[in-house]
Image (cartoon, rainbow, N blue to C red):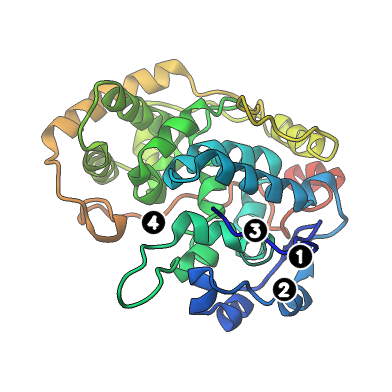
Amino acid sequence: MMAGMPAGEAPTSLGLLPDAVVAKYLSRGMRSGRELPPQVALRKASMPCGEDSGRGRAVAVRELVEEAVLRYDGRRTAADGWLAPRLHATLRMTRAEAADSRLWNFIAMIVAPDYVVWRHKGADSDEGDGTAAAARFSGPHHTQAFSRLWWAAELFRDGDDYRPVEVACQVQDVLNTTMRLDVIDHRPTAQALLKIVERALDTGARRPGDLVNALSSAVNAAGSTLVYDVLAPDTETDTDALLDWIADGAESAPVPWDRLPEGPDDGRVATSAVDALLPLFDKLLADAPLRRRAKRGEPGGTAARTGVSLQKPTDRPASAVPDPRNARAATVG
């Protein structure tokens, strides 16, 4: 079980914690769970997110991670599929805001460092206690413990429908490998890949992770986002609907625990676009050898990748979790 934060330690509001501060204070003892990060020093080094709005509060995040541990103790990887959509629906923000690593540093080091250890700690050995990798506290968007979940929900949701996110999180290689690919920024590509993953899970594939790595590598090597957009054009997302959803977060009730929340109603992927890609992806998978698992989750070792877009043209560079009343003008202006 997760040890929990001492009474009075968990903050009520989110903040921004620079990468350099994490590097200064993150010790092996903290990564093993034997020590908690120095809360006083970290809070002094943090910056506020701005006006304390409903979506800027840390209490809801803390409640989510504690519930995830209660539900999935002994099944740590299964917690991802439950937590990812609920974290996304709780921390309502644009991609530009979510690209600010300082927000995720704050959550990992100050709001829920014990959850990072619980979810990502390695096994103990004769040499010493197992640890969570430093990058789980402060690292790339596809590796950091909380950022990876938010981005999984963002990249694999189908408009307001989070069900595809649950499918994505059933196979860790989707988060570890597929989520890094630049082509996943194309929504029909992401949904078509998940259709094949879901089919493999339904038919009882013995090693779905190998299938995911082979398919991801083949799809990424065969084309680019631009190529796939010609084959399967994506519909334009509704920016106003996204910003309304973000603004509504300040007054919305906590996300439900026993059913999926609703995401932003900014438009679903056209079924015709997904159907246009499925035969191609089936052929790519049939022609691709099911390679051995690549080291550190890399896709097959041959496909180039540049990473998903962390900022859309409609996004604005901004500090994380701003006042939602200013979001519309700043984003579309």
Residue 138 x/y as whole percent: 54, 67
Residue 158 x/y as whole percent: 53, 27
Q: Looking at the image, which residue is at 75% across and 60% down?
A: 10
Q: For marks 1 and 3, give the one nearer the viewer.
A: 3
Task: Determine whether, in the image, residue 151 is placed left or right of residue 75.
Answer: right
Q: What amino acid is labelled 2 in the image? A: Gln
Task: Check disc 1 and report the residue beneath it.
Answer: 9
Residue 53 x/y as whole percent: 85, 49
Q: Is residue 311 above or below residue 270?
A: below
Residues under numbered marks 1 and 4 in contact, where contact means CB atoms less than 8 Å apart: no
- Secondary structure at badge 3 equals loop
Q: Tell me the tag on residue 39.
A: 2
Residues under numbered marks 2 and 4 in contact, where contact means CB atoms less than 8 Å apart: no
Q: Looking at the image, which residue is at 71% across and 75% down?
A: 42
Residues under numbered marks 1 and 2 in contact, where contact means CB atoms less than 8 Å apart: yes
Q: Is residue 141 visible?
A: no
Q: What amino acid is labelled 4 in the image? A: Thr
Give the class, few, some or many, for how many residues have Cα within 10 Å of label 2's Cα (few <14, many ≥20).
Answer: some
Task: Check disc 3 and report the residue beneath it.
Answer: 4
Q: For marks 1 and 4, give the one nearer the viewer.
A: 1
Give the class, few, some or many, for how many residues have Cα within 10 Å of label 1's Cα (few <14, many ≥20).
Answer: few
Q: Which circle's residue, 3 or 2, is located before the other in the chain?
A: 3
Task: Check disc 4 and report the residue beneath it.
Answer: 306
Q: Tell me the tag on residue 83.
A: none
Q: Looking at the image, which residue is at 54% across and 72% down?
A: 34
Task: Determine whether, in the image, residue 309 is placed left or right of residue 249.
Answer: left
Q: Which circle's residue, 1 or 3, is located before the other in the chain?
A: 3
User: Marks 1 and 4, how far apart in space?
Assistant: 39 Å
User: Marks 3 and 2, how far apart in space?
Assistant: 14 Å
Q: Quadrant of residue 47?
A: bottom right
User: Marks 4 and 3, how far apart in space?
Assistant: 37 Å
Nearest the eye: 273 or 138? 138
